[in-house]
Amino acid sequence: MESNGTRNHPADCDVTVQLSDCGRQDARAVFETLDRVFTGCDMPTPGPEQAHDREPTVWMATFDSSARREERPGPPQLSTEVTALLTGDHQAVAEVEKALGGLFDIRSATSVSGEHEKEARLQLASRYVTH
């Protein structure tokens, strides 16, 4: 995966995504799917589970909302609902929120807007595709 740390891009396009109330597999599913939509700026890949490891309470990654990829991923399956907190510029957060809305069933959404930044909290669940 390419890191935006070495590329020039507007910082106001970065959106920090924090996931909570989920385990390693669900965090990986959300981040890998977002990485197929946007370029991940800073996305540590959760390593393999260890029997003695304690799970983090929050998983975090940053995505460049201006760097959309052509790939159109299908909706990933989650084992449970996942809370996502998006933080960044108003337009950048709206772009990531829109992408998540196309990939997941959003059970609830709240947001707080400041002068230069927006924070959106979403409750994500698997979207079941009907044929």
Image (cartoon, rainbow, N blue to C red):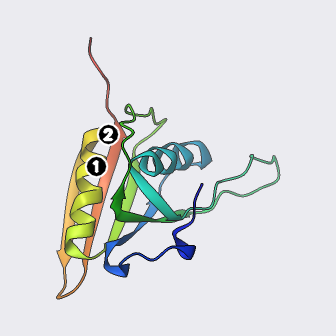
The quarter of the picture where the C terminus appears is top left
Callout 2–callout 1 Cβ contact below 8 Å: yes
Residue 26: mark: none
Give left or right: position of 61 versus 50: left
- Residue 65 in percent (x, y) is at 33, 63
- Residue 21 in percent (x, y) is at 48, 54
Disc 1 element: helix
Mark 1 Cα-neighbour bin, 10 Å: few <14, some 14–19, many ≥20? some
State the residue position of label 2: 103
For badge 2, the amino acid type reads: Leu
- Residue 85 in percent (x, y) is at 36, 65
Q: Residue at x 61, y 48 (%)?
A: 24
Residue 114 placement: quadrant: bottom left
- Residue 33 in percent (x, y) is at 45, 44
State the residue position of label 1: 99
Number of marks: 2
Mark 2 Cα-neighbour bin, 10 Å: few <14, some 14–19, many ≥20? many
